[in-house]
Amino acid sequence: MPVYKLIYFKSRGRGEMIRLAFAAAGVKYEDCRLTREEFEELKASGIVPFDQLPILEVDGKILAKSMTICKYVARETGFAPTESFEVAKADMIVDGIDDLTDKGVQVFIEKDEETKVMFLVGINQFKQLWFICQNSKLLSYLQNNYINVNSGRRGDLKKLEEAIPS
Ligand SMILES: N[C@@H](CCC(=O)N[C@@H](CS)C(=O)NCC(=O)O)C(=O)O
């Protein structure tokens, strides 16, 4: 098994899907979470493709782009399908998650509170979210494996689930 080092910020963001993929596969990896200053230093070293995180080091070799990394981890750990149409279906869900993440990032970086709320409402109405939840059972996976029952966040997810048309 190669030595994996995932480098991202001290947040879930675009790194979390990769952390979930490793967790689902039960594969050990170093979960390196940088501060903004540490990221600037790493960038200055010139090893960060696209000057963006996350990146994954695999035995010292570097891979960038969160969804590319997710798909790579899924292939390496036996979670990815191999039949052509099934691969395309998995890619379709990954692309949907990517679109959804872009919308989430919009909310995260928006400073104006009213615009933030507008973006949030937009996400709840976002068809991709419904599709992903229906097809990948993402929400139930998150609820069963990831959300701390005692943290109160389970309630948030429940609300989100109820907002999704069935
Ligand atoms: N499509 C890329 C987007 C990566 C991206 O935008 N990463 C942000 C953090 S979420 C970043 O590193 N931005 C550079 C910066 O903040 O200076 C991916 O999925 O990896």
Image: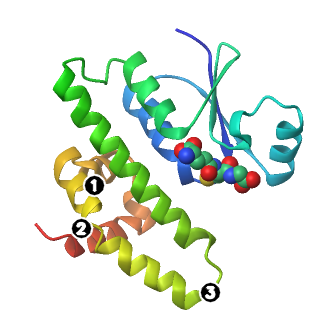
The disc label shown at residue 139, or none: 1
Determine if the C-beta at disc 2 is less than 8 A from ligand 1.
no
**Distance of label 3 from label 1 (alpha carbons):** 29 Å
Task: Choose top left, top right, bottom left or bottom right for residue 126.
Answer: bottom left
Q: CA distance from mark 1 to mark 2?
A: 8 Å
Check disc 3 and give the amino acid type. Answer: Asp
Mark 3 or mark 1, earlier in chain: 3
Residue at figure coordinates x 69%, y 44% from the top left:
52
Query: Dot 3 lies on which element?
Result: loop
5 sits to left or right of 129: right
Residues packed near mark 2 inside 10 Å, few (<14), some (14 to 19) or many (20 plus): some
Q: In the rendered image, which quarter contains the C terminus?
A: bottom left
Above or below residue 147? Residue 151 is below
In the rendered structure, the answer to whether residue 86 lies left or right of residue 2 reads left
Q: Are marks 1 and 2 in contact (CB under 8 Å)?
A: yes
- For image coordinates 58% across by 88% down, the residue present is 113
CA neighbours of label 1 inside 10 A, class few (<14), some (14 to 19), many (20+): some
Q: Check disc 2 and report the residue beneath it.
A: 161
Query: Between residues 131 and 153, which one lies in front from this camera angle?
Result: 131
Identity of the residue furthest to the bottom in this view: 114
**Amino acid found under the numbered disc labelled 2:** Glu
Q: Quarter-wise, where is residue 2 in the image?
A: top right
Amino acid residing under circle 1: Leu
Of circles 3 and 2, the one toward us is 3
Q: Which mark is residue 112?
A: 3
Q: Position of residue 119 (x, y in %)?
A: 45, 78
